[in-house]
Amino acid sequence: MTGSRGSRFKIFLLWLIPVAFMLLFFGRPLLSIFRLVFSSRFSQGWTFFSWEQLTRPLLFSFQQALLSTALTLLIGLPAAFLFARFDFPARKTLRAFSLIPFILPTVVVAAAFNTLIGPRGWINLLLMDLFNLSEPPLSILNKLPAILLAHVFYNTSIVIRIAGQSMERLNPNMIEAAYVLQATPFHAWRTVALPLLLPSIGGAAMLAFLFNFTSFGVVLMLGGPGYATLEVAIYTQVFDRFNLPMAGVLAIVQLIVTWLVAIVQNRVSRTLFGNAMVTQRNAVRRHPSGRKEKIFVIAMCVLLILLFIVPLLSLVLRSFVSLDASGGEVGGVKTAFTFRYYTELFRNRHDSIFYADPISVIRHSLVYSFIATIIATGVGLLASYAIAGSGKRFSRVMESFLMLPLGAGSVILGLGFLLTYKHAPWTSGRFPVILPIAHALIALPFVVRTLLPAIRGIPRNLREVAAVMGASPWRIRREVDFPLLTRALLVSLTFSFTISLGEFGASGFLANAYTATMPVAIFRYMSQPGALNYGQGLAMSTLLMITSVAGSFFIEHMRLPRKTGAHTSEMCLIGE
Amino acid sequence: MKLKKQNVRIILVLSLLLVLLTACGPKAAPDRGQESDDLRHQSRGSCIEGHAGLPTKTDAKPQRLTVMTHDSFSVSKDLITAFETAFNADVMFIKGGDAGSALNRLILTSASSNRPEADVFYGIDNTFLSRALDHRLFESYRPTAFGKIPATFNQDPDFNVVPVNYADVCINYDRMWFEEHDIPLPQTLQDLTNPIYKGLLVVENPATSSPGLCFLLATIAELQEDTARDFWIALKENGVVIASDWETAYYTHFSGSSGKGACPMVVSYATSPAAEQIYAETEQDESPTASLLIPGTIWRQIEYAGILKNTPNRALAETFIDFLLSKAFQEEVPLHMFVYPVLPDAALPPEFALLTQTHDAFHTMDPLEIAENRDRWVNDWTEWMFD
């Protein structure tokens, strides 16, 4: 794929912006923080180092990430298949809801699970009532199952979106052709569909694995102090021991593992065909027919509702219900419908200088995520085209290089940002420019992972035909590539938008005192005692969910021109 | 036709977003210049006595003063505006995460350059004090109001930092739960290991939580190391629940909070019951929770502020420290941050005075002693509780 000198120069130009972005906003902050923590100021010799403090969290990170990823795939793949292949009532709603967990701050997810499966959550109350028990029978808080459950809750949407969009693009004619050639359904799927889907399934699995591997809030809050991933260990080394070089070592190990995982995934799931057969026809989805399919659709819907909608709904409901302990009166708690938590959001009780009304908090969040979405999608699109056009070896290296932001701990990267970009306009001004950039950096791996398989899947002969017919390169992009990339583009826009909207780690570090984002505001409420503070946290979480659903609905319905797409896919069939 | 309609939609969407962006760009930060004049007049007199004689130049460009603090810091807008007007200053706050993170951030950024990120730092407590002093972050300053502060609060003989507020870490309990179950309240530290309180207490991990560390230090100060070990092992056998942070302990595990957990006792602050009542959903005669004031479970957490080394705004920074110790600021501290002022003649707000309980049997420790033993104690505790 090296091509002529002219096309090499074009590839070089494509690389320019992504590489500069990564070096400036990833390489530079990391280098400066590592240089500082390993300088003689913080470390003398290797006295800071302890093998046990490295191996223990490393081992646990691997164990729980493998388990969590396996469980996520177990639920996510059938769910992706469901959304990609079947039409049924409430499909769109369910699909939009499945994205919400991805953006919720851990404090809120912990609260949601607590209202559901906590010691006084309604499942336990129901079981106690049914079987006349005096003790709650289910207790998974502070245990491994709580971590696994939360990881599945968080990451299933990655599999649904990323594997799903390639399932949607899969040309059913290919499978039909296999049937015609007397293949069994299983055989057809295994030998035709799976190899075509493997790049995106592998990509989704890798993202889920890395997310689990670097998990912080879930492990800290739901797993409790008995468990520590590398990311938690980094935080403890910095917060409790102030052993910065040790934190630096842990961060480097985490980066190396991320790099290795990305490389391994890249080798394993590289597509076997140069160009996967794709389609843009909308006829791919159909209503379930036959008993087996109907049972599958119903069972999956029930499972997804239980996993996603019920915990979220219990949280939303709770934000409208007051639990009145009625002044020390012995007996049950009175519940009543209330708007109080929402109205209280608009009240600045003590005239605090840091108070921000919910409207402006939502506005701050939207501004940040709008900018982050533009940056991430723009840089990601350039990078994906550059990877697709580069030589095999180089593209492999660069592809895994672009995955690295997932592996840099937010504690370490956040401190690096502060060292490198501590002056206006980056952080210290009224509008911290570095914040949307940090969000875009975190979203970039997702964008690349989503766009790259789609770009690689564009049949080359289509472009060649267009070129032969005299279309300019720009026109080829617009009329051949763009329609075929629409779905992947929408998915990556949705991901960047929601990642930025829900991001808390870097926001807690970099947001200035006056422009809090929604997750930061939620955390502020929930770190104070008092029913109204807790209620306001829940109310703000509900607003965050509404914003994200509205945003992703909006993006997915931003129907980009499709008509030419239908033409090209027809052309594609003729061309073959 | 269809294509056109879609294009129109896209243009609409983009223009909407543009409008949104341009509309809120400049508004994203609070506007300082728009403070109405009468507000300035109103607040000018109310604040900061003792500085009335200082010269003020209102015509010159205000001098920027950057104050770094933690997430829980709060102050009223009026008071800051009054300060800004009185000293022709423009005060800008940076919130650096929780108390520990803000301090770490400061140490790192000041290690990498000579110019500090801020002029004043507010919010190091006595458990972190030695870490701050070790890294020589501050310039010594002894404010005039210093004489009025009780000597017990000052733990730095060199005046690198000055105490501003304090709060007691202690056990909160769910009043209704104890009433309903007809179980007497524990009276001593050792009572907590009694089987009738099995699984009823939730504490925070001292390695990741500040109140958790305070509580551990209180037990060690009370019992000495060896007995403390026995106590904690007995507590573990009695089913003590350990959470990583205050938020999880309070809202997931504690039954007295809105989270409705399973444990009726939690390590929190002596002022939390007051917050529970002030932030109750409906007006209550009493708080749903109360503090359990048992000797050996109470730790006095003192918060300090200091002028950062090499600040180019030393004079204004001094004024700000004076301001923190002024009666006006000290009287705001209780309702804004749910802590007590260090100035004895600062009046407490009525609801605060009524609601909070105090006890003399609290512990503190010399910051040096904490610094020397902290790592070992937290390590030992982790071994006791998890091995």
Image (spheres, rainbow, N blue to C red):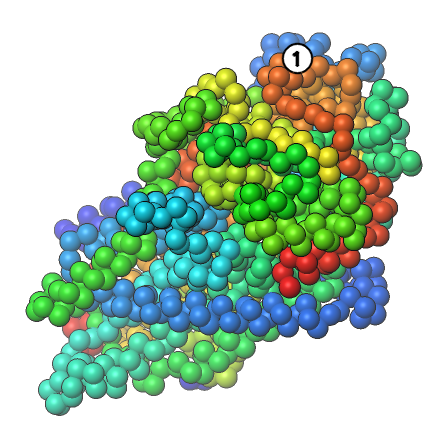
The crowding category of the residue bearing disc 1, from other C-alpha atoms within 10 Å (few below 14, some 14 to 19, many at least 20), is some
Q: Nearer the viewer, residue B259 or A559?
A: B259
The residue under the point 32% across, 55% down is A307
The residue under the point 13% across, 64% down is A294
Image spot of residue A424 (x, y percent): 65, 43
Image spot of residue A121 (x, y percent): 38, 45
Can see residue A138? yes
Left or right, A399 with reference to A453: right
Q: Residue furthest right?
A: B158
Q: Nearer the viewer, residue B124 or A419?
A: B124
Q: Nearer the viewer, residue B22 or A58?
A: A58
Which quadrant: the C terminus of chain B?
Answer: bottom right
Left or right, A513 with reference to B368: left
Q: Which quarter of the figure has residue B351?
A: top right
Count of numbered circles in the view:
1
Left or right, A333 with reference to A356: left
Image spot of residue B345 (x, y percent): 77, 15
Can see residue A495? no
Position of residue A435 relative to residue B121, above or below, is below
> Circle 1 is placed at which residue position?
B43
Position of residue B265 relative to residue B46, above or below, is below
Q: Which quarter of the figure has residue B157?
A: top right
Q: Nearer the viewer, residue B71 or A203?
A: B71
**What residue type is disc 1 on?**
Ser
The residue under the point 16% across, 88% down is A183
The residue under the point 34% across, 40% down is A316
